[in-house]
Image: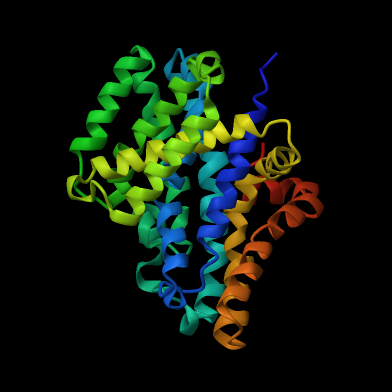
Amino acid sequence: MKKYYKDMDIARGIGIFLVVLGHSFPDSAFNGSAFYAYIYKLIYSFHMPFFFVISGFFAYKIYSIKTVRDYGSFVYGKFKRLMVPYFAVSLVAVPIKLYMNNYAARPVKLNSLITNILIYPLDIPIQYFWFIYTLFFIFAVAPIFKKLPINLTLVITLLFNLLFTKQIGLFYVYGVIHYLFYFFFGVYLKNTYDKWNNIKNKYAIVLVFSIVLMAMNVFDVGKEVYPYYNLVTSLLGSSIFLMVSQLIMNTSGGELFRKVGKYSYDIYLLSWFSQTGARVLCYQMLKLNYSFVIVIMILVGFIPILICKWILNKIPILSKVFLGHK
């Protein structure tokens, strides 16, 4: 029987909360607030690598691939899970963005729309869907490393991460190469879970790591040696919240994040619609207080839980197309 990792469901919940929070600031000026700007910077210093770590933790199927047919079946399964919702939700977003182009920070351009969705995922209607696109290609590439010892794979992918710094937007090659390390760091954690789980003094470690991470984001310590800076902040942030997930497992907060974590992918796919609608209505049209709008955008960011639970999950064809369910 497959082992259940409650702490990783909690980690998913924490991760998606950080995503929703990061998308809840109505504009990039942060209303002139240094505090809001700092929170945003802090979240973005690690939260996407954190998701790749979690994805790698559950990527056990790459090690069961024996034949070309197995590989084809594996990639096809990931295509249905990741790319079908990527295309479907992106296309649904197009008419909405066209209607609201005057309010959009990144207006849709029809002449390049299909090209961008297919091969330039940084310029798509829902920009943060680059993660889904990149994760699919990482899953497609990852089996190449399955016969190597995980420690050697970590070294190789770490070198890729540090040495490959050229931003190639085509098929987001840069992202695939860059995030492979975090993906396999998650695989490594799965393989050494008992050791990780039994680390002592987690509270002290979380405190020290948090102080270092916050200081790095305040003073940009190490920024001059990019990409090492991003590597350190990503590992610090991921380690902090992986340990926090274990520390709060038996608390009401942990249970709340666990429940949210079960819908993390659904929230990621659909929260753009509710959050964008709230931003346009409450901030750009009604000109409501900036902080109040942030709270509203956080709350509506979790509306997809209700939509999926009450509607999409009850209609098989919709759950397959928009959520990637089997």
Number of numbered labels in the structure image: 0
318 above or below 149? below
Rendered location of residue 286, percent (x, y): 62, 88
Colour mode? rainbow
**Quadrant location of the N terminus in the rendered image:** top right
Residue 31 in sight: yes
Residue drawn at x 51%, y 34% is 54
**Quadrant location of the C terminus in the rendered image:** top right
Rendered location of residue 44, percent (x, y): 42, 53
168 above or below 239? below
**Would residue 305 be found to the left or right of residue 75 on screen?**
right
Residue drawn at x 64%, y 68% is 295
**Would residue 253 be found to the left or right of residue 215 on screen?**
right
Residue drawn at x 43%, y 36% is 208
Rendered location of residue 144, percent (x, y): 34, 22
Q: Nearer the viewer, residue 151 or 40?
A: 40
Residue drawn at x 43%, y 20% is 188
**Would residue 92 be found to the left or right of residue 262 on screen?**
left
Q: Nearer the viewer, residue 227 or 103?
A: 227
Asked which quadrant contains residue 301, the reply is bottom right
Residue 76 in sight: no
Q: Nearer the viewer, residue 111 or 268?
A: 268
11 above or below 114? above
Q: Nearer the viewer, residue 242 or 168?
A: 242
Rendered location of residue 255, percent (x, y): 74, 38
Q: Residue furthest bottom?
A: 286
219 above or below 144? below
